[in-house]
């Protein structure tokens, strides 16, 4: 059973930066993804990274602004966000999957509790 704990959310102004962390424990997995959900909207994929190789990709909506990385020694993944926009506001979740670099939430078996990111205009 994999446990995931996100941290690092907060309030930031438009154009600002924020870094999220996701600490994993309790088991192994092949990919870790970040998703976000704004109020009244469906959860959407943000980025994913393969845990062993470190290959990653991000959704086009955040490409060039968000970077996903991981530290295997610390069993922690990160999402570095720059040039934030109000549209980036939402609850950010990390999730672990046995699939490789999948953007489909249905493939993620384990989920964190989420951390709130609010970008003020």
Image (spheres, rainbow, N blue to C red):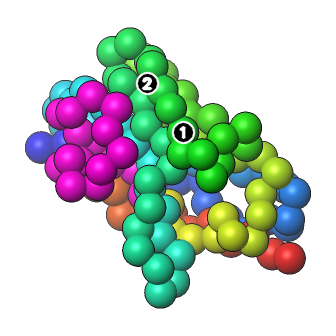
- Residue 73 in the magenta stretch? The answer is no
| CB contact under 8 Å: marks 2 and 1 | no
Work out which quarter of the rendered image holds the N terminus and state it. top left
Q: Is residue 61 visible?
A: yes
Please, is residue 28 above or below residue 113 in the view? Answer: above
Label number found at residue 74: 2
Work out which quarter of the rendered image holds the C terminus and state it. bottom right
Point 45% across, 19% down: residue = 55
Point 18% across, 33% down: residue = 98
Is 100 displayed left or right of 48 in the figure? left
Badge count: 2
Of the residues under marks 2 and 1, which one precedes in the sequence?
Answer: 1
Q: Which residue is mark 1?
A: 58
Q: Nearer the viewer, mark 2 or mark 1?
A: 1
Answer with the quarter of the image where residue 99 lies. top left
Question: Is the residue marked by circle 1 packed among few (<14), some (14-19), or many (20+) residues within 10 Å?
Answer: many
Q: Position of residue 80 (x, y in %)?
A: 66, 40
Please, is residue 26 above or below residue 116 in the view? Answer: above
Which residues are drawn in magenta? 93-109
Say which of 29 and 42 sits in front. Answer: 42
Residue at the outermost top position? 53
Disc 1 secondary structure class: strand
Residue at the outermost left position? 1
Q: Position of residue 70 (x, y in %)?
A: 48, 26
Label number found at residue 69: none
Is 113 displayed left or right of 87 in the figure? left
């Amino acid at each position: 059973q994999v446990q995931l704990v996100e941290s690092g959310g907060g309030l930031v102004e438009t154009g600002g930066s924020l870094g999220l962390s996701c600490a994993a424990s309790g088991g192994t997995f092949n990919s870790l993804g970040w998703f976000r959900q704004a109020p009244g909207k469906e959860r959407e994929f943000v980025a994913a990274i393969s845990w062993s190789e470190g290959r990653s990709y991000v959704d086009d909506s955040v490409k060039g602004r968000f970077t996903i990385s991981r530290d295997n020694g610390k069993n922690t993944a990160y999402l570095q966000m720059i040039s934030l926009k109000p549209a980036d506001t939402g609850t950010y979740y990390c999730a672990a999957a046995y699939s490789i670099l999948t953007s489909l939430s249905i493939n993620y078996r384990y989920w964190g509790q989420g951390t709130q990111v609010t970008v003020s205009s």
